[in-house]
Image: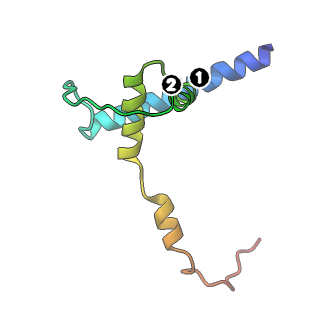
Amino acid sequence: MTIRGAATAASEERIAHTRNRLVLEQARAVGLLGAAKNTRLSGRVPSELIEAAKKRAHVTSDTELLELALSRLALEDDFGARLVGRKGSISADIDLGI
């Protein structure tokens, strides 16, 4: 790996860790994560999916991956749905000045 490639990989990892920390902090702040881990989740998924998700999220354990993924889903906003819902609400002949 080149020096630039190593620096980019390190930067991506720092960004991922920061993003993960912020998601988990927000989940804790709204009461989704706490001291008690009182539910067990089990399922069958392709190992390739798990490994790709861990690599992308820069996590190593299944528990970290599940907490992060579920927190992201629970905290996800509805921006996309609201944006699509606005389709046609602005006149097509409006001058955007572009």
Residue 51 percent location from the top left of the image: 54, 25
Nearest to the observer: residue 89 or residue 32: 32
- Residue drawn where x is 50% and y is 29% of the image: 50
Q: Distance between the residues labelled 2 and 1?
A: 6 Å
**Labels 2 & 1 near each other (Cβ < 8 A):** yes
How many other residues sit within 10 Å of disc 2, few (<14), some (14-19) or many (≥20)? some
Image quadrant in which you'd find residue 67? top left
Check disc 1 and report the residue beneath it. 13
Check disc 2 and report the residue beneath it. 17
- Determine the secondary structure under disc 1: helix
Residue 33 percent location from the top left of the image: 27, 32
Q: Which mark is residue 38?
A: none
User: Quarter holding the N terminus?
Assistant: top right
Residue 87 percent location from the top left of the image: 56, 75
Image quadrant in which you'd find residue 70? top left
Image quadrant in which you'd find residue 45? top left
Q: Which amino acid does label 1 sit on?
A: Glu
| Colouring used for the render | rainbow
Q: How many labels does the image show?
A: 2
